[in-house]
């Protein structure tokens, strides 16, 4: 049985270096990024899914194939959700936006994914990390 928490894919120092959070992190922008990445996972489109990751994450994994393998192994609920819905958006991590996503996996277990974002120099937002937690009362 999986533990209640899986790892964090994040380079904490990278969050401190992001541009100041401005109007670009409107919740609909962040939700669109997450939805598009999940759709890329569902379509096995590693190149597209990898493109939504921050430069630091891309540097860590070096290739879409390595990134997709890590997501398949450590983030299965994100990789193949049965369904998902968006919770609140906030500024919690070094002033960078955070988006909550509630996920039900293919076995009916409930999860909460906390997506952390980083703004790139061109003004675009990318996923800088995901913290995944299995919710209480949700067992295999």
Image (cartoon, rainbow, N blue to C red):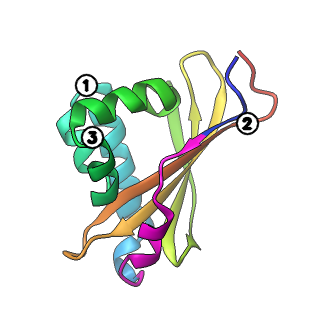
Quarter of the figure that contains the N terminus: top right
The quadrant holding residue 72 is top left
The residue that disc 1 covers is 44
Q: Is residue 16 above or below residue 6?
A: below
Picture residue at 46% right of the left edge, 53% below the top: 129
Q: Is residue 40 above or below residue 54?
A: above
Q: Which residue is mark 3?
A: 49
In-image side of 10 versus 38 (left or right): right
Relative to residue 69, is residue 48 depicted above or below? below
Lower sequence index among marks 1 and 2:
1
Q: Quadrant of the C terminus?
A: top right
Separation (CA) of disc 1 from disc 2: 27 Å
Q: Which residues are magenta?
A: 7-21
Q: Secondary structure at mark 3?
A: helix
Estimate the x, y position of residue 24 in percent, counting from the top left. Answer: 34, 76
Q: Is residue 134 above or below residue 2?
A: below
The residue where tag 2 is placed is 135
**Front position in the image: 132 or 84:** 132
Ranked by sequence position, the earlier of labels 3 and 1 is 1
Is residue 75 found left or right of 59 in the rendered image?
right
Image point (52%, 78%), residue name: 95
The spot of residue 87 in percent (x, y) is: 59, 54
Label 1, secondary structure: give it. loop
């Amino acid at each position: 049985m999986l533990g209640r928490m899986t790892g964090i894919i994040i380079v904490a120092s990278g969050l401190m270096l992001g541009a100041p959070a401005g109007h670009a992190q409107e919740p609909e922008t962040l939700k669109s990024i997450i939805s598009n990445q999940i759709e890329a996972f569902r379509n096995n489109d590693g190149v597209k899914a990898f493109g939504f990751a921050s430069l630091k994450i891309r540097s860590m994994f070096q290739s879409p194939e390595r990134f997709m393998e890590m997501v398949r192994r450590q983030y299965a609920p994100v990789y193949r959700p049965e369904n998902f819905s968006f919770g609140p958006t906030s500024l919690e991590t070094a002033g960078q936006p955070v988006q909550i996503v509630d996920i039900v996996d293919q076995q009916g277990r409930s999860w909460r994914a906390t997506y952390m974002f980083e703004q790139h120099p061109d003004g675009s937002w990318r996923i800088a990390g995901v913290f995944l937690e299995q919710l209480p009362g949700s067992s295999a």
